[in-house]
Structures are given as structure tokens and as C-alpha cells.
Amino acid sequence: MIDINAKIRAYLLYLKQCKELDAKYDLDHNEIKLLNEVALAIMSNQPLTVSKALELQAIASPATIHAAMKRLVVKQMLVQIPSKDSRTKYLELTKLGLKRYSELSEITISSTK
């Protein structure tokens, strides 16, 4: 049997807790990736537009991304905000979406103790 050291054990516990959290919110792989892209864009003060999100081929095809986007809106994790001219829509995390990231940060903090 392989001996798993404390650092590896902590990381595996972190992964397990993240997986449990994503299950709590009923998130699939594509939804998680899209939420992460939206959060990273917000963090860098460059909000992600719907059209730019659909171009994220590293996540999936545009149709798959669009379906994930729609599911996240229904799950109240994401909202589409129209620009002033109404031609562009920006993706923003909702309070629930932000709560998930807060919970993820708690997992990160607890796994390093």
C-alpha cells in the first residue's frame, strides 16, 4: 500500500470537500469552469460578456457553454446584465454564486491548518 504523506492527504481532503460543495450546488464540470472564468474576469476588473464566454473553447463548444450558462441562471448562480446600449450582456455572479466562492475559500483555509 502507498504511504500518503500529510500534504497529499490535505490536498485530497480539499478535493473531496470541493467535490461535495459542487454536488451541494448541483454543478457539473462545464458549469464550474464557466463560473471560474466569470469570477476571474470580475477579479481582474474585466467583466466577461456572453459573446466572449461563448468563445472559450477550452471549456467546451459554444452550444455547450450556452447550455451551461442557461442552467447557471436557472440555478441562480449567474445573471446576465445588459449594457447601456442593450447589445452586449455581461455575466455576473449572484449572491449565491459569490457564496459558493466564500465556501470554497473556507475549504482552502481549513485544508491548510
Image: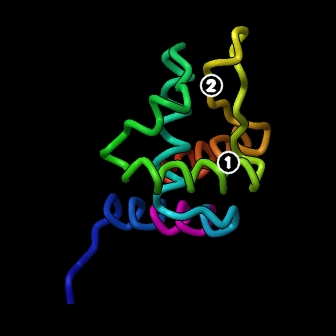
Residue 31 sits inside the magenta stretch: no
Residue 39 percent location from the top left of the image: 55, 32
24 above or below 34? below
Q: Residue at x 38, y 67 (%)?
A: 9
Q: Residue at x 48, y 60 (%)?
A: 14
**Residue 34 falls left or right of residue 9:** right
- For marks 1 and 2, give the CA distance: 20 Å
Q: Earlier in the sequence, mark 1 or mark 2?
A: 2
Kind of residue sitting beneath label 2: Tyr
Q: Nearer the viewer, residue 52 or 30?
A: 52
Of all residues, the one furthest to the left in this rendering is: 2
Residue 34 percent location from the top left of the image: 50, 45
Q: Main secondary structure of the magenta part?
A: helix
Q: Nearer the viewer, residue 1 or 50?
A: 50
Of all residues, the one furthest to the top in this rendering is: 84
Give the number of the disc on residue 90: 2
Residue 20 percent location from the top left of the image: 60, 69
Residue 100 percent location from the top left of the image: 67, 48
Residue 19 sits inside the magenta stretch: yes
Give the number of the disc on residue 100: 1
Q: Secondary structure at mark 1?
A: helix
**Residue 24 falls left or right of residue 8:** right
Q: Which residues are magenta?
A: 15-21
Quarter where residue 38 is shown: top right
